[in-house]
Amino acid sequence: MEKLWGGRFTKETNKLVDEFTASIHFDQKLALEDIEGSLAHVQMLGECGIIPLEDADAIIIGLEKIEKKIVNGEVEFATEHEDIHMNIEKMLHDEIGPVAGKLHTGRSRNDQVATDMHIYLKRKTVDIIKLVEEVQKSILGQAEANVETIMPGYTHLQRAQPILFAHHLLAYFWMLERDKERLRDSLKRINWLPLGAGALAGTTFPIKRERTAELLQFKQIYPNSLDAVSDRDFILEFLSIASILMTHISRLSEELILWSSQEFQFIELDDSFCTGSSIMPQKKNPDVPELLRGKTGRVYGNLMGLLTVLKGLPLAYNKDMQEDKEGMFDTVETLEGSLSLLAPMIETMKVNRDNMYVAVSQDFSNATDIADYLVTKGLPFRQAHEIIGKIVLYAIQHQKFLLDLTMEEYKSFSPMFSDDIYTILQPKHVVDARDSFGGTGKQQVLVQLQLAFDKFN
């Protein structure tokens, strides 16, 4: 098949140019979306009388045959046909003859490729939302099993206050919930149909874009043809959301790596999600969370890459925009792989409750509660804060923890202390005392768990 645009040229394209400009080696991922868009387009053409109904029917039958061959892996895509659109048109021509040329009536590859990507990203966004929910469910399962597991809470990676392990895990549940909301909201913009915009100015044919939108289940039609073919905001938005989502995945992965280290020993990852060392037989490496953390960088890179491609482009379509696809495909595949691994890895991890409790019993993370204790006795917080600082310094100098100090030692700092301080300082009491909404107290964590479970009802 001659190039669609070859009539104006007197020389064949340099083979290096063909190789350099061809996109078929990556945009073949859009094959089924391209056929879906073409089926709706040709049905609309036939219904509007723009092409004879019998020609429309022949094209539809041909496209459906090609679709089956693609699904069955029976086709080979050729570089000389440049992209997925021309490859499929060549297959259609081979299947039904010259009538295949009528398929491109009233459209351009510019609005065609934009439509393909909208269809692709709409489907993939729905798939990724489901994968996020699987991770959330695995988090909920571990949180529900650990509503009495106490661990050190950290700021600056220094022990700060005791919290429930369930509370810590649920922080990631809500991060993912916001990611999910962002993905759902982005569907409003993805659900805009560019088809019918032509190359940039619309078409002279009496098409019905509303009918095409109905057939493809799009809720909105681009009202401006220039915007329709040049807009990649929907991809940028997806890549932005994906970058935030990968940030959350990376933060959780970092904690899984720390918690499973010999220094923490808070959790143990299942053997099926770890690897060994080729030289050190004792090693059990958390390679999966490390790779999840590492792959975050490529998602960021894909976002920055497309932002850079688009920042100086005049309207409407420019060949630079061919660079919009590989980063999008890579990000989708990275998210799908990451989320698919993260859910079962969390579900199968072993929680070392005793180690967590020992850790929280051998630090000064209950110090704030002494300050609160003195405040309830009438001492201003700033004075209480200073007293507790001195008590902690004293305990460190004497190699003791706060529960080890005698009443005589406490009273040397303030006469307000009495025996009830030993109850106040118990890790369980410290945790349960934080009973404000959203706090780590058990009753509030149970409330939070119910709110989380309600997201799936």
Image (tube, grey):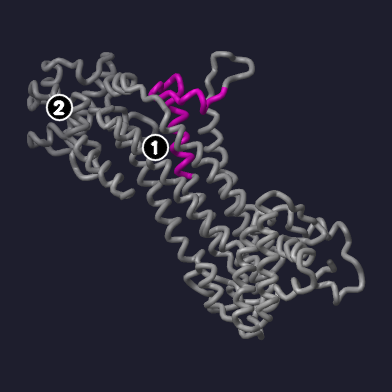
The residue carrying mark 2 is 424
Q: In the picture, residue 67 is in which quadrant?
A: bottom right
Residue nearer the viewer, 68 or 355:
68
Residue 178 visible, this angle:
yes
Quadrant assignment, res 135:
top left
Q: Secondary structure at mark 1?
A: helix
Q: Magenta region: which residues? A: 247-275
Percent coordinates x, y for residue 439 in the rendering = 24, 40
Looking at this view, is 447 or 126 the one in front?
A: 126
Q: Is residue 270 highlighted in magenta? A: yes
Q: Is residue 63 magenta?
A: no
Which of the pair 264/44 is nearer the observer?
Answer: 44
Q: Position of residue 160 (x, y in %)?
A: 30, 32
Instruction: Evaluate whether residue 160 shows in this view.
Output: no
What amino acid is labelled 1 in the image?
Answer: Ser
Residue at image point 49% right, 51% down = 127
Question: Neighbour class for label 1 at 10 Å: few (<14), some, many (≥20)?
Answer: some
In the rendered image, which residue does mark 1 sit on? Answer: 138
- Of 204 and 276, the residue lying toward us: 204
CA gap, disc 2 to disc 1? 34 Å
